[in-house]
Image (cartoon, rainbow, N blue to C red):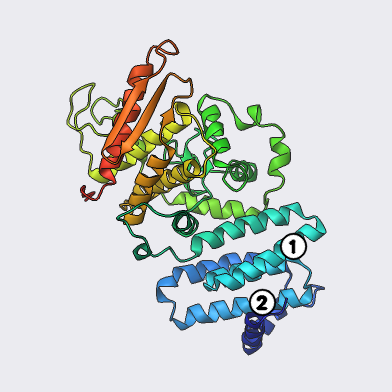
Amino acid sequence: MTTNWLKKLLGQAKAQRPEVARLEANASESPHPATPPSLVACMLDVRLEQVSSLKQLRMHAQAYRVMNMMRGITLESMQADPEDPMAWVNIGRVQIEDEKFDSAKEAIAHARSLAKRSGNAQMEGITDVLRFQLLRRQPKARQESFDLSRPLTEDQYQEYMSTTLGEMFYVCQSCGHLNLMLGEHCSNCRFAPQSLNECQVSLALSAMHCKTTTLVEIAQQIQRGRKPHEFIDNLDAIIKRFPTDQGILEKIKKNAEDDYLNFMAYDRCPACSKRVWPSSVDVCPHCHTKLDRPMLLKLALCVDRILQQLIWNLRRSDIAAYAQFVILLVNLKYLLVRKQQAPSDAQRQAAVDLLLKISPLYAQNGGGVVWVKSPTKVVSEVLDSAVHKDIGPTMDFIRDELLHFLRLVSDAVSLF
């Protein structure tokens, strides 16, 4: 699998030979002729962190020196054992950091084929994680490529969903809420994995392993108070497929140290501490205290309410638009809560189009339905009042939240 980019990389490695030789001399007691892939992985964690801190100064000589040195180390490891999938994984990681995404994809695919050939399920899991990292690092789809005056085509949707949004969302194993980034505190309960087992469970409860409808169902079961091991068959066997490297846990713990906006603090009235369910209200319905909710916060609360209704009260669907809508909502919540950024024009348009595609939305108990007729009209209807005494108010609440969501993502509303 020696391609042009690999030949060029080999030449760069030879140019950095003095630094590679120095590193090899430090490990001279090792019986191996080159740095072992496991040691390369540990060194990569340190070196890539250095480069990340310099990504705003990528022209700086130190960034180039570090990356060139890591290219040389990974190539030495690969040449020592070309059939070792970990060596190709390390090459893929360097290529991702160096923003050579096509070369990274090629290296990851080769690592996966080697892992499959040797029956190494754990290494296959590592390549899956790396593949999702590659998807996230690829350039975002250019917004100007979309004509926002009319619905996006299916091809545009596929490009938009694959390059603009992170798809590896997961279910919090503690509270059952849907989150985007593994390792950061859950925006609802502040949980973050603290052990290798918890990391593996989080990976098992992610889009890497389950389809969207399954994740939504799992979220409901956890929110009912059940533990994942209580209702998922063979969970212990499933999680063994995922990486158990201590370095992954350390990285997750480091991510969790960054404390972002506490979403729950804004979910309740500051005076009476009671949860205010409607996202559109400006006055607490319990104690009549005026609520200080900027438009961005209102949208974040509205997205959270809709996600909860998809988990608890609305039927799940296997159509592609349903999964895309859930992924979009999870990404919007991350964008709003973690970064305090408004959605892009393409995300706004996609939200409207996807809602129109998945309408009508039926209650799980069959007692009601909500129709999204247009970006400015949403109606609810009770089909069977006998299924639950609160079916009417529930469908009205869903209607109001969807209408509020459509209003907030429209071009007529400024979120600042």
**Total residue callouts:** 2
Residue visible at 48% across and 47% down in the picture: 180
Measured as percent of width and height from the top left, residue 311 is found at 47, 31
Residue furthest to the bottom in view is 15
The location of residue 34, given as percent across then percent down, is 75, 76
Residue occupying the point 36% across, 24% down: 395
Q: Is residue 58 above or below residue 86?
A: below
- Identify the amino acid type marked 1: Ser
Q: Residue at x 77, y 67 (%)?
A: 84
The residue where tag 1 is placed is 113
Q: Percent from the top left, x then y, of residue 378?
A: 30, 33
User: The disc labelled 2 sits on which kind of residue?
Assistant: Ile
From the viewer's perspective, is residue 170 above or below residue 59?
A: above
The CA span between labels 1 and 2 is: 22 Å
Q: Is residue 253 left or right of residue 117?
A: left
For residue 154, the mark is none
From the image, which quarter does the N terminus lie in? Answer: bottom right
Tag 1 and tag 2, C-beta contact below 8 Å: no
Residue 90 figure quarter: bottom right
Label 1 secondary element: helix
Q: What residue is pinned by disc 2?
A: 73
Please indicate, yes or no, whether residue 54 appears anywhere in the rendered image.
Answer: yes
Say what secondary structure mark 2 lies in: helix
Where on the picture, by quarter, is residue 245? bottom right
Between circles 1 and 2, the one closer to the viewer is 1
In this picture, residue 112 sits left or right of residue 308: right
Q: How crowded is the residue under tag 2: few (<14 C-alpha within 10 Å), some, or many (20+)? A: many
Compare residues 71 and 285 and report the one nearer the observer. Answer: 285
